[in-house]
Amino acid sequence: MTPPNRLEIETNEIVAAAIGASTFDEPRGEMFVASEHLIPFGNIGVSASTPLLLTWVASTAIHGFGDAPPLLRPVARDELEELKVRVLYLEEEVARLLALAVDEEVIELRDISKEEAKQEVLAMFQSGETVFYSDLATRLRLDLPLVVEVCQELEEEGEIEVHADAI
Amino acid sequence: MPTLFEAGDALRGDRVAIDARRLSNPKTINQSGRHKANAITASDNVYCVVEMPLRVRPRDHQSG
């Protein structure tokens, strides 16, 4: 194996400092959170698909150290495995919730006057069907409190009644 | 019909309609013996009403 050149040594020093490694021989971390595809870089694994890391390395080579980006945080292998399992679980949960959201019926309420609502509610009863407040609110796309108010007025006016046999 | 606002005011009925911004996931409650029930919490601008089946009043009742 050819010995690393000066640029590789300096870059290794920058990366080692960023992840908190005291020396190249005893790096505290060898994997990064950013990717599972690692390439050997001295004694330290460096993410091959992390433009941010490479940009930062190039930048620090020119401008010196800055605050290390979060991608450089070293993690233990078992912690990484745990995170992978966790991400897998969360992806499944997101897929499940999205499937539920697609099935969810969305009702766009209409903004109409109380008199108009009264006429529409009365028309719904003309079929002779027995309905609940929530049925009317859903079918007519009206606010539930408005439907209740209108039905109570219609009840007082003798237009509708509680269907006791249906209870 | 009164609308209740105070903490501790309760509704009891065979069927209650709920309008709310947020509903919790239903939880199963084991009651006495084999009885089970479900519990749900509605929050943010909640409106609940006890529902009764309604129908149009027959005309022959009104004319009498």
Image: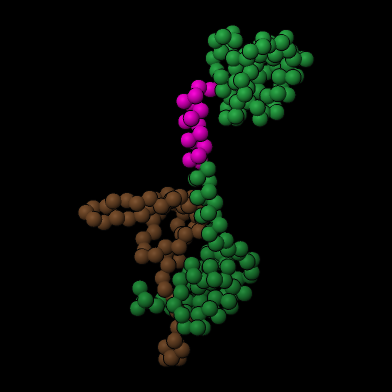
Q: How is the image coloured?
A: by chain
Question: Of A14 and A140, which appears nearest the observer?
Answer: A14
| Rendered image quadrant of residue A17 | top right
| Rendered image quadrant of residue A66 | top right
Chain A appears what colour? green
Quarter the N terminus of chain B occupies: bottom left
Residue B36, image x, y percentages: 29, 55
Question: Of A10 and B12, which appears nearest the observer?
Answer: A10
Residue B7, image x, y percentages: 42, 49
Please give the name of the residue rendered at 28% of the width and 51% of the height, measured from the top-left corner. Answer: B30
What is the span of residues highlighted in magenta in the rendered image? A72-90
In the displayed structure, does residue A12 sit left or right of residue B57? right
Query: Where is B33 relative to A151, above or below?
Result: above
Q: Residue furthest front?
A: A1
- Residue A76 belongs to magenta span: yes
Give the main secondary structure of the magenta stretch.
helix
Please give the name of the residue rendered at 38% of the width and 50% of the height, measured from the top-left corner. Answer: B27
Residue A114, image x, y percentages: 60, 71
In the displayed structure, does residue A120 sit left or right of residue A64? left
Residue B21, image x, y percentages: 53, 53
Please give the name of the residue rendered at 50% of the width and 39% of the height, measured from the top-left corner. Answer: A88
Please give the name of the residue rendered at 74% of the width and 19% of the height, measured from the top-left corner. Answer: A58
Query: Where is A66 relative to A37, above or below?
Result: above
Does residue B2 appear in this view?
no
Query: Where is B5 relative to A148, above or below?
Result: above
Question: Of A64 and A84, which appears nearest the observer?
Answer: A84
Give me the chain that's brown. Answer: B
